[in-house]
Amino acid sequence: MSSGEAPSSAKSSDRKPVAAPAGLPAREAAVRLIAAVLDEGHSFDAAVAKELKATSLPPRDRALARLIAATVLRRLGELEAILQSFLEKPLPKRGHLWPILLSGAAQLLFLATPPHAAVGLAVEQARADRQARRYDKLVNALLRRVAREGAAALEGRDAVRLNIPEWLFKRWVATYGEADARRIAQASLTEAPLDLSVKSAPEGWARRLGGFTLPTDTVRLSAGGRIEDLDGYADGAWWVQDAAAALPVRLLGSIAGRSVADLCAAPGGKTAQLAAAGADVTAVDLAEARLKRLRANLARLQLEAHLIEADAVTWAPGRTFDAVLLDAPCTSTGTIRRHPDILRLKRADDVAALAGLQSRLLDNAVRLVAPGGTLLYCTCSLEPEEGVQQIEALLARAPLFARTPIAPGECGIPAEWLTPEGDLRTLPFHLPLDRPELSGLDGFYAARLNRRT
Ligand SMILES: C[S@@+](CC[C@H](N)C(=O)[O-])C[C@H]1O[C@@H](n2cnc3c(N)ncnc32)[C@H](O)[C@@H]1O
C-alpha cells in the first residue's frame, strides 16, 4: 500500500495506486475536523459541513478524512493514554500538533494504515504547520513508537473507561447496571451501519442495494461510500434513517388522511415517513437552516408537508391535530455511534437543561392534540430524565392523557426493546447480528399517549 492509499477499513472499490504525498490532503482535512471539534467546540456534522463540503477534495479523500476524525473522537481516551505514556513531558494541546499526533496514532492503532504512510504523512503535516514544525522529529519518533509498541500497550487497558467520559458512564451504570452500561459503551464505540427507510418495496431495495431488511422494514447496508451515489437516491426512493429512529412514526398506526403536527421536525426523517404514509403533515422547527434542509429533503423525495418556522414551546396555530409527534432536542447519547463528538462536547449539565426544554415542549404539545388523538414523544437519549421521567411527570400533570402501551411484536418490535410500562427503549447493543459492523441500533425512547375523547 502506498502512502496515499486509504486504511483498509475505508471503502476500496475505486482504489487506484497513487504516489505519496497523495494522501496528504485527506490527513490535513482530518486534522482540521479534529481541531474544529476538540479545540473550537463545533459539532462533528457542522465541522464536516464547513471543512469537507466546501473543499474540492475527491469523495474518497473526504470519506477517509471523516473516518480518521471519527475514529479519533471515538477513541480519544485510548489514543491520548498511549501518546502520553510515550512522552516524557506533555506537549502543547493548542494548535495542530496534538491533532496531527492523534490522527497518526488512530491510523496506526485502529485503521490498519501502514506505518510508513501514517508516520510519513504526519511528519509532512507537522513540517507544513508553523507551530508544529519544530516538533517534526518528535512526531516521527513518537509515531514510530506507537507503530511498534502501541497495540501491545493498549492491551489490558479498559477501552470503555478510557473513551467514555466518567460522568456519562456513571449515569449509564446508575440507570442500566454495570453490565449493560458496558455493553452500551462498547456498542457506542463502533461505527453504525447505514440504515435506509424506503417509500415502498423494502425487500426489492435491499436486493438492489446489496443489503438486507430488518424485521421493522428498515433496509440495512454496510457504512461507507457516498450516499448520493447509491441507486434510488436521485429518484427519492429512500432516505437515511436509523432503524430505531424509524420506529416512533410507525407506532402511530394508520395515519393516511389524518392531520399530524411534527414538532422539532428537521432534518425531516420522521416528516418524510409521515408524508409517505399519507398524513397531512405540519412540520415545525425553530432553525431556519435546518428547515431549509428539510425542504430540500422533501423535494428530493417528492413528498409534501406544510413547513412552519416557529418555537414549538409557544407555537399556537389555533387548531388541534389527530396526532402530535414530539421528537424533542436532547443530549443524543443514544447516537454516539453516528455522532462520536457527543462524547467530547456534551456535559453533565446538558441533561438537566435539555430536560427543562423537553418539559416545556411537552406542555405545548398536549394543547395541540385533538380529543381522542395521539401524542407520541421520543428522544434519541439514553438518559431517563429525557425519557421515561418526562412521561411520568407529564401523566401526573395532564390528567386527560393516558399511555397506550406498545405491545411486543407491534411493528416488528421485540419485547426486549420495550419497558414494563410499554414504552420503546432501544439500546445501542440491541439487534446483535453475525457481523458486528451490521449490528446494533440507536438508543431511542418513545412513549405513546392518548387524549381522552
Ligand atoms: C432531534 S432533532 C429532530 C429530528 C427530526 N425529527 C427527524 O426525524 O429528522 C431536534 C430538532 O429540534 C429543533 N428544535 C430545538 N428546539 C426547538 C424549539 N424550541 N422549537 C422547535 N424546534 C426546536 C432543532 O432545530 C432540531 O432540528
Image: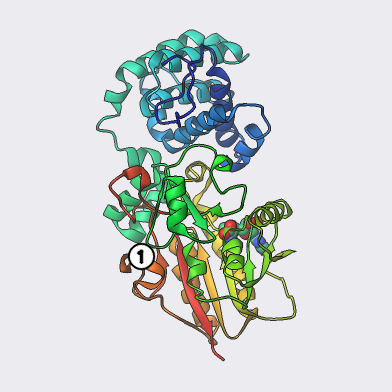
How many C-alpha atoms fall within 10 Å of the one at disc 1: few (<14), some, or many (≥20)?
many
SS type, badge 1: helix
Q: Quadrant of residue 36?
A: top right
Residue designated by label 1: 417
Residue at the image position 54 percent from the left and 81 percent from the top = 397
Can you say whether 15 is above or below 430 in the image? above
Q: Is label 1 within 8 A of ligand 1 (CB to nearest ligand atom)? A: no
Q: Quadrant of residue 53?
A: top right
Q: Position of residue 171 (x, y in %)?
A: 39, 55
Residue at the image position 53 percent from the left and 43 percent from the top = 230
Q: Position of residue 395 (x, y in %)?
A: 50, 80
Which quarter holds ligand 1?
Answer: bottom right
Q: Is residue 334 visible?
A: no
Q: Position of residue 291 (x, y in %)?
A: 70, 56
Report the residue that reaches farthest toward the bottom.
Answer: 453
Look at label 1 and name its amino acid. Answer: Trp
